[in-house]
Image (tube, rainbow, N blue to C red):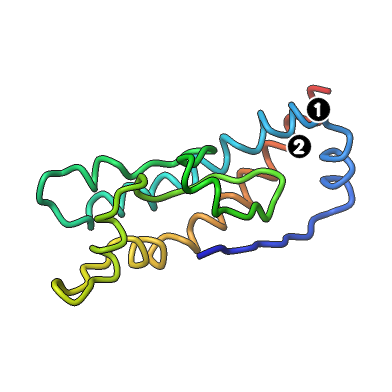
Amino acid sequence: MKVKVTSTGTKDIARRLDAMSKALQRKTIIPVLIKNTRPIADDMRDKAPRRSGQLANSVTVSTRLSPHQATVNEPIAQFEVYVGPGPLPQAIQEEFGNEHQPAEPFIRPAYDAGVDRALRGIAEDGIAAILAAGKKG
């Protein structure tokens, strides 16, 4: 599932962001995204079915996908972080079930519980980080 968030801000914030180099933008924005999506990952780990623990331990927040995940991903933004389990077959089976086992969702419930807080945090922390980085030059 992809969520696209478009935000509008003041002209000052947009001007400061445009003035920043791409490297500085990445250095400023990625930590904000990671910080504010980490609680969703923590909730996924808590909700993940426990058998071997491999599934829960594979849940990460990262700017990188596995090679297979990367082949099917279509980026929607200049900077993205990914939250979820690693490329384990059991992740799909647990989340959606199959004819042999019922679904035990852990990804969607964690997302639903944390997305509003994450978006608010990204907006608030992102604006503060951009303004602070703009002051530094």
Of residue 104 and residue 17, the one placed in the foreground of this image is: 104
Furthest-top residue in view?
A: 136
Q: How far apart are marks 2 and 1 (CA)?
A: 6 Å
Q: In which quarter of the image is residue 13?
A: top right
Q: Residue at x 41, y 62 (%)?
A: 111
Count residues near mark 2 (Cα–Cα under 10 Å), then give few for <14, some for 14-19, many for 20+.
some
Disc number placed over residue 83 in the picture, else none = none
Report the residue that reaches farthest toward the left.
Answer: 51
Location of residue 136 in the rendering, given as x and y in whole percent from the top left corner: 79, 22
Mark 1 Cα shell of 10 Å, populated few (<14), some (14-19), many (≥20)? few
The reply, left or right, for residue 32 in relation to residue 18 is: left
Q: What residue type is labelled 2?
A: Leu
Name the element at disc 1.
helix
Classify mark 2: helix, strand or loop: helix
**Residue in view at x 39 percent, y 53 percent:** 40
Position in image of residue 24 (x %, y %): 74, 27
Task: Report which residue position mark 1 lands on.
Answer: 135
Give above or below for 119 relative to 86: below
Say whether residue 4 is left or right of residue 101.
right
Residue at the spot of label 2: 131
- 100 or 23, nearer to the observer: 100
Cβ–Cβ below 8 Å for labels 2 and 1? yes
**Residue 41 location (% of width, % of height):** 36, 48
The quadrant of the rendering that contains the C terminus is: top right
- Please tell me in which quadrant of the rendered image residue 93 appears: bottom left
Residue 134 image position (x, y, % from top left) = 81, 31
**On screen, residue 104 above or below 21:** below
Residue 23's image quarter? top right
Relative vertical location of residue 110 with respect to residue 14 in this rendering, above or below: below
**In front: 36, or 23?**
23
